Image (cartoon, rainbow, N blue to C red):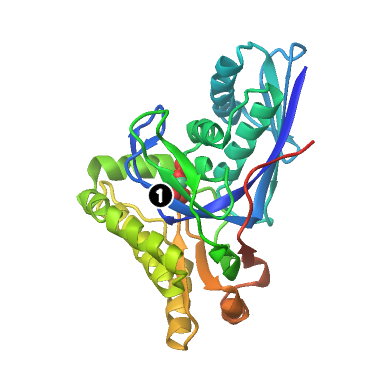
Amino acid sequence: MFKGKARAYTNIALIKYWGKKDEEFILPMNNSLSLTLDAFYTETEVIFSDTFTKDEFYLDGEQQDEKATKKISTFLDLVREKGQTTLNAQVISQNFVPTAAGLASSASGLAALAGACNEALQLGLDNAGLSRLARRGSGSACRSIYGGFVEWEKGVDDFTSYAKQIPSDHFEDDLAMVFLLLNDQQKDVSSRDGMRRTVETSSFYQGWLDSLDADLAQLKQAITDKNFQSLGETMERNALKMHGTTLAANPPFTYWSPDSLKAMQAVRDLRKQGVPCYFTMDAGPNVKILVEKKHLAAVKTACNHLFSEKQVVSAQAGSGITIIK
Ligand code: PMV
């Protein structure tokens, strides 16, 4: 019997990953850059044993259905190949997120699973190797191997596509992110389907790709200069551009809800009042607001006027993957 357990934190992209050039290996069309956060994380234990007749997957104490288990099994097959074993496994995962979060936990989930498997089968993967492995489970998971600011280098093949930490001289310690949990329903269009539809049909998609390098360069410069305004403006612009591509897809779609728009307006109003803060959104209606810690209280107060207390959750920069003994 071989066992391993790991914890990984979620990450939010400041420059988004949006579109795959290879669906099997999950190679992205563009580089992305994220901040790892401490508020939401996943702990996963994996046990490989000859007593199991098939793979089993438990999430928050409940055995998962065939579809969810199949996704985990496909990932475990990669691990079994690397570890040269045919043993079935039990995967026991716990998501530490506030109830009704409606937050995708695939990044922290698959990163934690990759770390647990590395430990269980003593695969000997370093962080780059873990990042590559996590990427095969869910693209954004490759960034959750590290804490702080993380760039996923798109690469050209399985070996060259992985994430690295960006030197930041602790800039992330000045920052906070407020999560506005606006909807806990299963999303209509998964990130996978949304990306595929956008890449294949959106006339705006080329514009996204064409402007990506400039956004990325500006955001990295902002990190180097510890320039919060430039960081926030670039992040917000990049998110709006990503969401713009979905409107020109066929059929068109959007992840925004009326509450998302309300939250965006609140951020703009705060800026007018002299509170520097900026928003970003992923493949769902939740809005995340980036702010310097010194203005966190002002942002939370404004959000609490518009949304219920349990919808407003703040986070700080989080750390990389940890092995739990
Ligand atoms: O890794 P996935 O398949 O969950 O896709 C993540 C896509 C976005 O959250 C929209 C952007 C990103 O870079 O995290």
Q: 323 above or below 265?
A: above
Amino acid at circle 1? Ser
**Residue 103 in the image, given as x and y percentages of width and height:** 57, 52
**Residue 279 in the image, given as x and y percentages of width and height:** 45, 68
The crowding category of the residue bearing disc 1, from other C-alpha atoms within 10 Å (few below 14, some 14 to 19, many at least 20), is many
Could you tell me if residue 190 is visible in this image?
no
Horizontal side of 265 relative to 143 (left or right) equals left
Q: Residue furthest bottom?
A: 273
From the viewer's side, name the closer residue of 293 and 204: 293
Image quarter of residue 134: top right
Residue in view at x 44 percent, y 72 percent: 227
Give the quarter of the figure containing the N terminus. Answer: top right
**Residue 7 in the image, given as x and y percentages of width and height:** 69, 42
Image quarter of residue 300: bottom right
Q: 177 above or below 33?
A: below
From the viewer's side, name the closer residue of 191 and 214: 214
The answer as to whether callout 1 falls within 8 Å of ligand 1 is yes
Name the residue carrying label 1: 32
Q: Secondary structure at mark 1?
A: strand
Residue in view at x 63 percent, y 29 percent: 65
Q: 39 above or below 225?
A: above
Image quarter of residue 43: top right
Residue in view at x 63 percent, y 55 percent: 318
**Residue 111 in the image, given as x and y percentages of width and height:** 59, 39
Horizontal side of 59 relative to 218 (left or right) equals right
Give the quarter of the figure containing the C terminus. Answer: top right
Residue in view at x 71 percent, y 12 percent: 53
Could you tell me if residue 19 is visible in this image?
yes
